[in-house]
Image: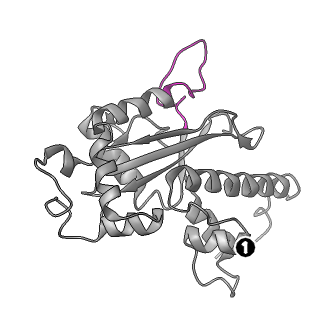
Amino acid sequence: MKNNLICVFDFETDGADPHVCSPVQLAAVIVDPIKLKIIKDSEFNINFKPERLEKATGVTIDNHPYTDSDILEWHGKVRGVDKSQILEEWLEYPDQKHSWQQFISYLEGYHITNKGKKSKFTAPIACGYNINRFDMKIIDRLSEKYNNFDAKEKTTSIFHPRDKIDLMNVVHLWFMYVSEIKSISLDSMRSYLGISSDNAHDALKDVTDCANILTRFLRLHKNFAQRIQFKNSFAHEQTV
């Protein structure tokens, strides 16, 4: 159960709706579930030219496909730069297909194989913060678009088909009875746990923070699991 490696990943995007937005950055690190630490040199970080800009012509800061939103301003505020710099950078990013293929190749290197045979069951386990509601929806969309979709499982074929770890759900279970915590957003958790917010919302920073939080919780789970008597714990109790 614990052999598959864990891929902690995160998208930064050009919108808030995972059903239509385009990625502009994708970062990942790989966690070893046995050693409970990030695998050395496993960092992945790539940019994507958003689909709106792939299709647009004659783009300027006064004439661009994002006049209906403040997304350029938001990214500029996060980065501490003008929105014109964000737009210029996005225009220079590699196209979506290229960046997606780079991510697929990256994941291929982290299968747990038996005699060299790879399958969806040897693939890394997807992990991230709020991935069930956001990032996995983008993964599934791009998987369908670029033929990495498993019709039988009705989900992407690039990750393990059954197991996923949404760290936000883990955090919720541990802190739902802690009254001083009013929010379990990643930014709130960083503040509560004493993690620096410098470069927050850069995808590589976010996945590194998530991986460090994850490994702490996995160590905690491991220690508790070895001390608790689970076997036959319901055998002599009347359940409702």
Q: Work out whether residue 201 can be spotted.
A: yes
**Relative image position of residue 223 (x, y in whole percent):** 85, 54
Quick check: 158 above or below 170? above
| Viewer-side residue, 38 vs 112 | 38
Question: Residue lying farthest right?
Answer: 227
Q: Which residues are magenta?
A: 107-124
**Relative image position of residue 110 (x, y in whole percent):** 57, 28
Magenta-drawn stretch contains 153: no
Q: Which residue is mark 1?
A: 238
Q: Main secondary structure of the magenta part?
A: loop
Q: How is the image coloured?
A: one colour
Q: Amino acid at mark 1?
A: Gln
| Viewer-side residue, 199 vs 220 | 199
Indicate the quadrant where residue 152 lies: top left
Picture mark count: 1
Give the SS element for disc 1.
loop
